[in-house]
Amino acid sequence: MPTFADARGREWMVTIDTSTIRRAKESSGLYLVDLIAGDDAETLFKRLARDPCLVVDVAWGVCQPAAAAAKIERPEFDAALVGDAIDAARHAILEGLLAFFPSRFREVLPMRPPDADPSAPGNSSGDLPASSESTPAP
């Protein structure tokens, strides 16, 4: 189960299921399944890689039940997701999203592993796959 730590050292477990996907959409407007199965997945990956506020909004939807159990309100949660904690949350969310899909789909999903080197060629925006247009034909 993927986890991330916020800037205050609190550990957050990321479990993606249909309820989580609905909460994330309510909190961020982003339907997580579209990152993989949507027609505009590449654009959504770029938004998630470049917009820290979107990552925090999605993370709130993912972590809201645990935050409620710990009596952590949204402003406190938001304040603790800064700097590297934002990247850690994004990676954990993407890892959890991969685990959500059945194994037969994971092999063909058009995304890099969450721990892919963001400075690698063709991966300038983090977990974004290289464009299929630049891939030579076999």
Image (tube, rainbow, N blue to C red):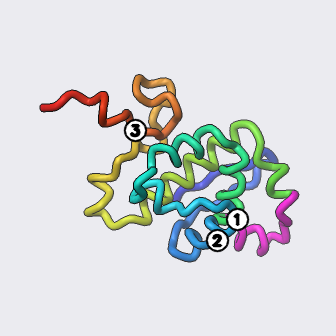
Residue on which disc 2 sits: 23
Query: Which mark is first along the chain, 3 or 1?
Result: 1
Determine whether the residue tagged by mark 3 lies in a helix, strand or loop.
loop
* Residue 4 placement (x, y as % from top left): 64, 51
Q: Could you say which quadrant of the image residue 77 lies in?
A: bottom right
Residue at the spot 40% in from the left edge and 42% down from the top edge: 112
The reply to whether the C-beta atoms of the residues labelled 1 and 2 are less than 8 Å apart is yes
- Decide whether the magenta segment is chiefly helix, strand or loop: helix
Instruction: Answer with mark 2 or mark 3, whichever residue precedes in sequence.
Output: 2
Name the quarter where the C terminus is drawn: top left
Task: Give how far apart the Cα atoms at labels 1 and 3 are.
Answer: 26 Å
From which residue to which does the magenta span run? Answer: 63-75
Tag 3: Cα neighbours inside 10 Å, few (<14), some, or many (≥20)? some
- Residue flagged by tag 3: what amino acid is it? Pro
Q: CA distance from mark 1 to mark 2?
A: 6 Å
Residue at image location 81% in from the left, 48% down from the top: 8
**In this view, 69 is above or below 13:** below
